[in-house]
Image (cartoon, coloured by chain):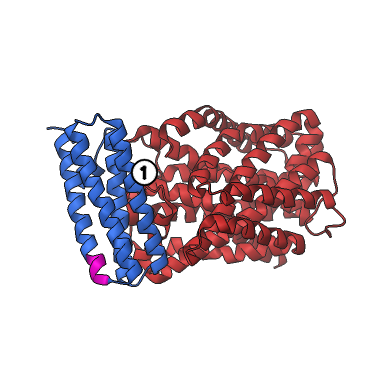
Chain colours: A blue, B red
């Protein structure tokens, strides 16, 4: 996550990775707010839906910016797909009023964020 | 005592009227992406608008003319046509963004998509203008706009490192995403130095029958009111940096992210305060811009104008704000993203500045209008600086929109 935040280059994949990381943190903030009773369900649900859609778009963008056989593309797209799926799960949990499902989705989101950060560090982070 | 009350009310009006969707969105994006580093842009914009508002008020109080009226009379209609068209176009985009801001607030509060709110919001604004008086619109909505002070409270509660805040007040070069940094700086300046703000102010001074005895009042309102308004914008940036930035939310490109500015600080009431702030600030701005469109056209064509008149006494004036509101609601009703429109319209506002600011240099130095109250050296230096800045912004705004805009 820190590697993404500190990213200084701005190629297409790097830029999309940063957007994905930011979107996932938005989802985490919304889930926490909803779980604490600080965000209404309709707002939390709409935000998570919007975040999931943004993540799908990021994945699509990375696919179109890189050749299919690129390992960069495969790992980053997989991580972004996991983020999007977790955001959708969280949305379903919020709509059902199911705190446990949202908590589970939060863990999935954390894991996917770590995967994205690892993929980013492997391919894009400045080498010392 | 009466003057003191007027100054207080004027300051409240300026504070309540300063923050709108443009300043809120640009400050939030800048804070989330670049931390406290772009505070200088808000300060620079605030200093520029203080000078321009003071001059617009002084011009109106001494000459009895609005700025638009003065440009038409001094330079002729053909010359006036260019700033008129540019300002109408820019105002149209900004008004659309403001209607979008209210629609977003309604969407957040109800869960009903923002596009469904565009026409009802425009209708409500029209109803206020049709039935209301200038004082009601100017002061009523602005007093409600004081809810935006919640951002100042939030910024103080977050206990920022004031040394870093002070460091952010000094212009600095970006350490990452240079195009985005400069685009944000241009957008912040566009949001702060809005032509509608000083043009509306001069029309308001004429509506309120200001004369030379109001020069001190004008100076106090321009200086203190705009400074307090700028403080709210800086507070939004600080909150965005310390809440969104610290949580790793570095890209604010979805309006759903905006309530997260206040929720971690005030809990559920943060959500309510954000929605109320956005709705009231944007609704007030939409009313002012709709009126400004009507002022511009009516003053440009020499029609009868005045918000305190009955609609049958100035039908042309009323028709302009009616049509303007309807047209501005259409892009939002069609689903255009209000946040993207806001950021774009702020950059275009910056690009249009020279057309509206250059005339200040002539009007405020023309004895036939301002007599002994001409610009001094400092005021002229300030206008020349804003003009130079305006030309730079006009040249860089669109390329930066292409390379640095989200």
Mark 1 falls on what kind of element? loop
Q: Is disc 1 surrounded by few (<14), some (14 to 19) or many (20+) residues within 10 Å?
A: many
Q: Position of residue B372 (x, y in %)?
A: 76, 40
Is A101 one of the magenta-colored residues?
Answer: yes
Q: Position of residue B238 (x, y in %)?
A: 38, 53
- Residue in view at x 50 percent, y 47 percent: B337
Q: Is residue A12 above or below residue A112?
A: above
Q: Which span of residues is magenta-colored?
A: A99-103
Q: Is residue B397 above or below residue B57?
A: above
Q: Is residue B167 left or right of residue B296?
A: left
Which residue sits furthest right? Answer: B313
> Which image quarter: residue B84?
top right
Q: Position of residue B198 (x, y in %)?
A: 65, 46
- Residue in view at x 36 percent, y 43 percent: B37
Our reading of the magenta stretch's main secondary structure is helix
Q: Position of residue B78 (x, y in %)?
A: 78, 28
Is A53 one of the magenta-colored residues?
Answer: no
Residue B247 at least partly seen: no
Tell me the quarter of the image containing the C terminus of chain B. Answer: top left
Depth order, front residue of B157/B177 = B177
Which residue sits furthest left? Answer: A128
Which residue sits furthest front? Answer: A68
Depth order, front residue of A71/B13 = A71
Instruction: Chain letter for mark 1, please.
Output: B
Query: Which residue is identified by label 1?
Result: B37
Tell me the quarter of the image containing the N terminus of chain B. Answer: bottom right
> Which image quarter: residue B209?
bottom right
> Which image quarter: residue B16?
bottom right
Q: Is residue B341 above or below residue B159?
A: above
Q: Is residue B139 left or right of residue A28?
A: right
Residue B26 at least partly seen: yes
């Amino acid at each position: 996550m820190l590697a993404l935040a500190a990213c200084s280059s701005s190629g297409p994949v790097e830029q999309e990775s940063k957007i994905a990381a930011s979107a996932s943190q938005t989802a985490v903030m919304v889930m926490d707010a909803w779980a604490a009773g600080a965000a209404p369900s309709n707002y939390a649900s709409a935000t998570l839906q919007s975040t999931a859609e943004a993540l799908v778009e990021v994945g699509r963008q990375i696919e179109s910016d890189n050749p299919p056989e690129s390992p960069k593309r495969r790992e980053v797209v997989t991580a972004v797909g996991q983020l999007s799926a977790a955001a959708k799960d969280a949305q379903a949990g919020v709509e059902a009023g199911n705190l446990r499902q949202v908590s589970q989705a939060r863990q999935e989101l954390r894991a996917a964020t770590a995967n994205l950060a690892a993929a980013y560090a492997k391919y894009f982070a400045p080498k010392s | 005592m009466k003057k003191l009350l007027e100054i207080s009310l004027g300051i409240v009006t300026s504070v309540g009227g300063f923050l709108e969707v443009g300043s809120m969105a640009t400050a939030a994006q800048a804070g989330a992406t670049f931390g406290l580093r772009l505070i200088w842009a808000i300060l620079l914009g605030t200093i520029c608008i203080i000078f321009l508002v003071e001059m617009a008020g002084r011009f109106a109080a001494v000459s009895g003319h609005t700025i638009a009226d003065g440009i038409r009379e001094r330079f002729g209609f053909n010359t006036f046509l260019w700033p008129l068209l540019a300002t109408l176009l820019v105002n149209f985009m900004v008004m659309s963004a403001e209607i979008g801001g209210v629609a977003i607030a309604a969407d957040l509060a109800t869960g009903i998509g923002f596009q469904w709110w565009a026409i009802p919001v425009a209708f409500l604004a029209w109803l206020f203008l049709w039935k209301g008086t200038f004082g009601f619109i100017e002061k009523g909505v602005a007093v409600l706009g004081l809810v935006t002070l919640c951002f100042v409270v939030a910024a103080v509660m977050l206990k920022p490192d004031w040394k870093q805040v002070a460091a952010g007040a000094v212009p600095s070069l970006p350490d990452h995403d240079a195009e985005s940094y400069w685009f944000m700086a241009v957008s912040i300046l566009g949001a702060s130095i809005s032509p509608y703000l000083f043009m509306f102010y001069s029309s308001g001074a004429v509506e309120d029958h200001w004369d030379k005895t109001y020069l001190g009042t004008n100076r106090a309102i321009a200086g203190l009111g705009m400074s307090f308004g700028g403080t709210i914008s800086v507070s939004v940036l600080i909150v965005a940096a310390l809440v969104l930035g610290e949580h790793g939310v570095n890209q604010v490109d979805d309006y759903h992210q905006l309530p997260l500015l206040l929720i971690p600080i005030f809990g559920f009431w943060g959500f309510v305060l954000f929605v109320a702030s956005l709705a009231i600030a944007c609704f007030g701005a939409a009313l002012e811009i709709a009126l400004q469109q009507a002022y511009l056209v009516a003053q440009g064509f020499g029609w009868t104008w005045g918000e305190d008149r009955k609609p049958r006494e100035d039908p042309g004036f009323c028709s302009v704000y009616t049509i303007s509101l309807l047209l501005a609601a259409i892009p939002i009703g069609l689903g255009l993203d209000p946040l993207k429109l806001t950021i774009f319209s702020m950059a275009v506002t910056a690009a249009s500045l020279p057309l509206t600011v250059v005339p200040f240099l002539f009007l405020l130095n023309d004895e036939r209008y301002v007599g002994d109250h001409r610009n001094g050296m400092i005021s002229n230096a300030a206008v020349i600086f804003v003009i130079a800045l305006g030309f730079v912004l006009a040249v860089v705004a669109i390329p930066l929109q292409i390379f640095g805009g989200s």
